[in-house]
Image (tube, rainbow, N blue to C red):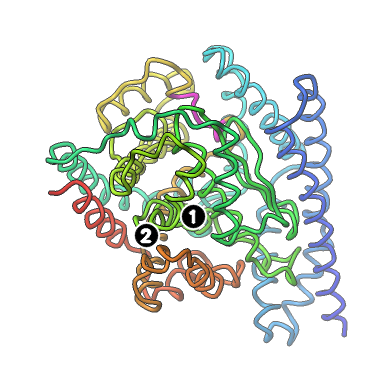
Amino acid sequence: MEAEKAYQWLVERGKEVAYLGAAASLLGWDQRTYIPAKGHPHRARQFAVISRLLHQLTTDPKIGEMLSVVEDSPLMDQPDVAANVRNWRRDYERRTRVPERLAVELAQAESEGESAWAELREKEDWAGFVPYLEKILSLKKEYAEAVGYEAEAYDALLEDFEPGERAERLEALFAELRPALVDLLQKIQGAPRQPDTSIVHRDFPVEAQKALILEVLPQLGYDLEAGRLDPTVHPFATRITPGDVRITTRYYDDYFNAAFFGSVHEAGHAMYEQGLPEAHWGTPLGEAVSLGVHESQSRMWENMVGRSRGFWEYFFPKARAHFPVLADVGLDDFVFAINEVRPSLIRVEADEVTYNLHILLRFEIELALFRGEIGVRDLPEVWNQKMEAYLGIRPTAYKDGVMQDVHWSGGLFGYFPTYTLGNVYAAQLFAKAEAELGTLEPNFARGEFAPLLAWLRDHVHVHGRRYTPRELMTRATGEAPRAMYLLRYLEKKYSALYGF
């Protein structure tokens, strides 16, 4: 009975933390969408207060006491209890190593950093942003030392986003991907066929874009009664509560791809969050397992579904109805245009082939920062050199280069590699889904997306944090994550499109 009471106490504490975290998520959504300019300074202080409360709640010594009671009881024979307790113990041990002072300083510095980035990026003021980033980097290094690591400081940060992942393994993954991607890119650039990309650079009124997106997303499975779509500077998805999972996008009235595929991408994230078991809200079994698995969902829906020919067999007539400028465009030409491969400066607008080279660049820079090989003031030149080496182009503006992403301003070091892991996971999951369900593209051509979503619900979403990312992938696909599936998918798709 004592163990059951202890476990119930832990569940209630988890829900209390979850609801306070939901309030922070709502404040973060507001800060990145509709907050008045003069609201930012006080918002940073709000985050500091909430961070202090969350730190106190999640490092309460009573948590450790309650965990010990349950860990020494027969309740651990119950799979749900064991999974929750294992994750609670991991989280508790990590959090109690971080001093409250550091947690609060980080929360405030990250909020101030994001606000400064949004303003200074538009002004091309790298020098003004440097002090913010230097402070955040210093605090994150202190954080890494506080939580601890076995091999190197960067591993401590990876652990926050992809439990069990290590820099050494990622270096090996990128070493396998890079030459194959560069080789594929060279084949594409020398291919006999090239797309007419002027098709996606016509007049696409913002309201018409929004109308099409709001028509498409519910059919994919995004529940708009439990979500919403809003504009922002840097697109994101956020779960407030199980019944409130919001997405954002960025519109250009002369470019189709950005808002449409950005929205489908964020809807992929949101459908994962909407598919987590609501009965476990507030416990690890009601949470996403990792950002890599999260990214696998968004990249799969954006690229393997949203850029497929079958998808557009169904949706292209609807797109034409919204955009008269597409009246003279054939389906195959449109599909070719939206799948153009061309080295570009902006990561979020990069194609499938070059995208992971953008991530490689950021991963190498982050490693160098945490290994002490470079400093913040070196970043623009290092960034530009790597862009030229990997993609053959060099930024001429900070907002198209080192200041383009929001991640570092929010302290999200260790986050970028999860994008590539997501691509690797997505290809492997999609291959397994097709092995079990049959070729999916004919379903897409009929507007049938439920079978894929149901498969993902059963094999990924329902498990929450029951397994580590690698365990989840192994259970879902029958083997540990492998780059082979991503490379095979890209080679097949783009050799057919470009005719080589």
Q: Looking at the picture, which amino acid does disc 2 mark?
A: Gly
> Label 1 belongs to which residue?
292
- Give the mark nearest the N terminus, 1 or 2: 1
Residue in the foreground of this view, choosing between 153 and 334: 334
> Which is nearer the eye, 190 or 213?
213
- Label 1, label 2: how many angstroms apart (C-alpha)? 26 Å
Taking the image as shown, residue 485 lies to the left or right of residue 278, namely left
Residue 96 seen by the camera: yes
Q: Is residue 213 magenta?
A: no
Residue 310: give its label.
2
The amino acid at mark 1 is Gly
Q: In which quarter of the image is residue 378?
A: top left
Residue 379 percent location from the top left of the image:
43, 22
Count of numbered circles on the image = 2
Vertical arrangement, residue 462 with respect to residue 153, above or below: below
x and y, in percent, of residue 273 in the image = 63, 59
Query: Over which residues does the magenta segment extend?
Result: 401-408
Q: Please tell me whether the stretch drawn in magenta is mainly helix, strand or loop.
A: loop
Q: What element carries label 1?
A: helix
Numbered disc 2: secondary structure: helix
Decide: few, some or many residues near mark 2? Use Cα within 10 Å; few <14, some 14-19, many ≥20: many
**Quadrant into which the N terminus falls:** bottom right
Q: Going by the image, does 204 lie left or right of 435?
A: right
